[in-house]
Amino acid sequence: MCFFAGENQTEQEVMIKAPVAVFVYNRLDNTRQTIEHLGRNEGAQHTDVFVFSDGGKDEASWHKVNEVREYLHELAENHGFKSLTLVERPENFYLERNITEGIAEVFQRYDRIIVLEDDICTSPFFLDYMNRAFDLYQDVPRVMHVSGFTNLSVEAPAFYFTPHMSGWGWGTWRDRWQQYFKHFGSREEALRGVTPADENRMQYGGVFPCLKSLDKRPIPWDICWEIAIYKAQGLCITPGHTMVRNIGLKQGTHFRSFDFLQHYEFDREPWQQPIPLTQILQPETDPRLEGLFADAIRDWGIRYTFLGRIIRFLYKKMVKKT
């Protein structure tokens, strides 16, 4: 572990600043953009940042990992945060282990955390929104998660509550995470105590087939947290406008975009204004917004052109025959 100290704080802060954990691998350009956008946030100079750099799987990936680490070491000389801590994994931890162990490390020192992966560009008011949400809902235990992203692109209130968590720029409190999070080892373990009706509600009647992720190995951390929140009847505070943009979608393993066939509904610029938050002591979901979410998440937010719909129709018919 390498520790890089920032400037000492000289003025009293009104708000507790949550630390930010950034999880990176081998995408230099995305990492640079993520860090640069974070550095433009109001309050960045009062924020401790931890970067968890995963190790490579082979010679080619180690070459890219070392390029990312070279950039991070250069950043340490002039980063603009309160402090910057770089944790270099000696081997490939894989995403789930890197994130869950990184969160555990940060929670040894802090009671709240903001989590970013290496492809999340934030609004200049992202940190302000996250920290105010932490302060307002610290003593409202049903609120278990703070989302920086919203699936909704329609008219929505400044913020709302939903049982659905988003992993694109998010945060939580130590007491919620340590009490409820468990990295499940199997589908059976994850769904213990969950009825078919629960599964249907969690998947919004089937339009959000998130439970398919339970068949992956290892099981993704985010579906484990989604299930934990649901089982605890918890809620996630979510902004009415997205405070983040995922810039890694078209480069990812699970998504390929062909612009003449489809576009991604969730690829939106972050909101460039503060989100006004108030404290609601007994937060509840809004059935209207839950219905809008079900529509927004249809086909994972992928919207097809006329040609795309034709090709998709023909492809489905062909698959059905085989």
Image (cartoon, grey):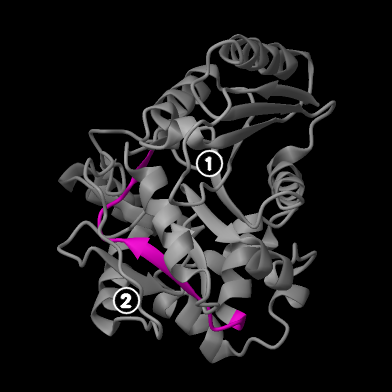
Can the viewer see residue 320? no
Q: Is residue 239 above or below residue 121?
A: below
Along the line of sight, which residue is nearer the eye, 186 or 140?
A: 140
Q: Is residue 292 above or below residue 299?
A: below
Describe the element under mark 2 as helix, strand or loop. Answer: helix
Q: Residue 233: percent from the left, percent from the top?
A: 54, 83
Instruction: Check residue 243 for magenta coloring.
Output: yes
Q: Quadrant of the N terminus?
A: top right
Q: Separation of disc 1 and disc 2 at Cα?
A: 25 Å
User: Could you tell me which residue is drawn at 48 percent across and 18 percent down?
Assistant: 29
Neighbor class of circle 2 (other Cα within 10 Å; few <14, some 14-19, many 20+) is: some
User: Could you tell me which residue is drawn at 52 percent across and 90 percent down?
Assistant: 197
Mark found first going from the N terminus, 1 or 2? 1
Along the line of sight, which residue is nearer the eye, 121 or 17?
A: 17
Instruction: Check residue 151 for magenta coloring.
Output: no
Can the viewer see residue 68? yes
**Magenta stretch?**
231-245
Residue on which the image places disc 2: 290
Question: At label 1, which amino acid type do we have?
Answer: Leu
- The label on residue 116 is 1
Determine which quarter of the picture holds residue 65: top right
Q: Residue 124: percent from the left, percent from the top?
A: 32, 36
Q: Is residue 315 above or below residue 294?
A: above
